[in-house]
Image: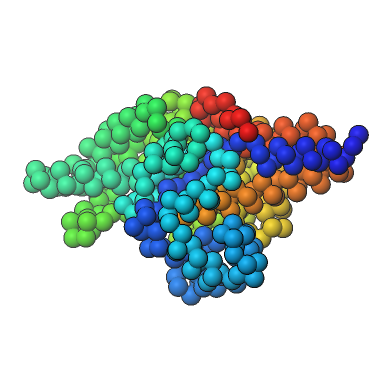
Amino acid sequence: MDINRDLWELSHVVFSYPAIDNHAHAFLREEFRDSVPFEGLVSEASGERALQDATYTAACFRATTQLAKLYGLSPDADWEAVKQHRRQIPYETLCRICMEPTRIQCILIDDGLSGGEKMYPYGWHDQFTPSKTKRIVRIEALAEDLLKREIAQHIQMSALSPSNIIHSFPPSLEAALRTAAADSEVVGFKSIACYRTGLDVAVMSSLDSDVPLEQLLTRLSLIYMSSGTLRLQDKKFNDYVVNLAMRIAGEAGKPVQFHTGLGDNDITLTLSSPAHMQPLIKAYPNTKIVLLHSSYPYTKEAGYLTAMYENVYLDFGEIFPFLNPEGQRQVLREVLELAPTNKIMWSTDGHYWPESYYLGTLQARQALFEVLESSVRKLELTLPQAIGIVKRALFENANRIYNLGLEPYAT
């Protein structure tokens, strides 16, 4: 056994094997490229002061060094120098220098992120990958858009009443979900219940009329009529939407992604653990559930669920670049503690800036190599076992779970 040769081969596979990015978001349109604070690249924090504090994190220091190298700047370049330089790079060039090194073959884009009018449609990203981009439908965004139309139609007919909406909304939502599930461009769904009412989603099959629900719809209708905005954040209503989507997705054989753990201050942290999802997981054994974002800081709980339930899968994303290097390695170790390696997948959670895809890929490959290198050196894994983990995590598992039917692009 030549350990150096084995580690060289492992390194080659880790850093060159094509990847399926199983959860990401669109780039900002060129005219909006600087409309969102760039500090969001390294933090989920909200507010000017919190974002400024994020530039003093170890994660930001590392990102600064890596981006300075990518842009050809001095190793001593600071965050402001990086920001200033990127503004001067033509946008198409910026996108390409960030995407070409990633070796991402296919992106699955959740196009329901707020501010969608500032972002490119998912198909626009095909120019950066050998395989076409596919779509993930955000359940709550679909329900909100549908409810807006329902309210507008009832207003137009002079028939706006909560009871009318309660009766018309469920069949309309079911039809919209079934249409999405039948669309070959849609490979899965995503829920942000974690952000709205928490992951303790109650199992339910119908949306029965009651006084609190009618009051909610009255309030939502008035808000929409006055401001044109609408946000679903009622536990009973949101839980119903998730349950209906779970049933339809299961029938169609398409996974449902759930935001878990790491997020901005809009979540209730204690309700963001996937452990709350056990009743839902048990209620829909034929629906594939993908726990996003490593469920950080609840990665161990996510690994347990992935190991114990046939229909649960674990994504290790978003921690790149939000955590420091040791934090990333520790999360990967926790993913590998218990979760079967044929049920784990990688993602960038790339959004807005092409640099989020670059850092999300570079740092993930580095962490994956370092964790597996250590195991190979300690004889805990053989080289074929380690290489198998890499190929499954980066490509094969997502290809199978989302029914993409792809072949790894030649490197």
Residue 148 in view (yes/no): yes
Q: Is residue 382 above or below residue 36?
A: above
Residue positioned most to the left: 158
Query: Is residue 362 toward the left or the right of residue 183 in the image?
Result: right
Tell me if residue 215 can be seen. no
Q: Residue at x 9, y 43 (%)?
A: 157
| Left or right of 258 on screen, residue 248 | left
Please provide percent x and percent y for residue 310. Answer: 61, 30
Q: Furthest residue to the right? A: 1
Q: Position of residue 242 (x, y in %)?
A: 41, 40
| The quadrant where residue 209 appears | top left
Q: Quadrant of the N terminus?
A: top right
Instruction: Indicate the position of residue 339 as horizontal and vertical percent values.
Output: 68, 38
Q: Tell which of 261 and 379 is nearer to you.
A: 379
Residue at x 79% of width, y 44% of height: 373
The residue located at (45%, 33%) in the rendering is: 132
Count of marks placed on residues: 0
Placement of the C terminus among the 4 image quadrants: top right
Residue 97, x across and y down, in percent? 53, 50
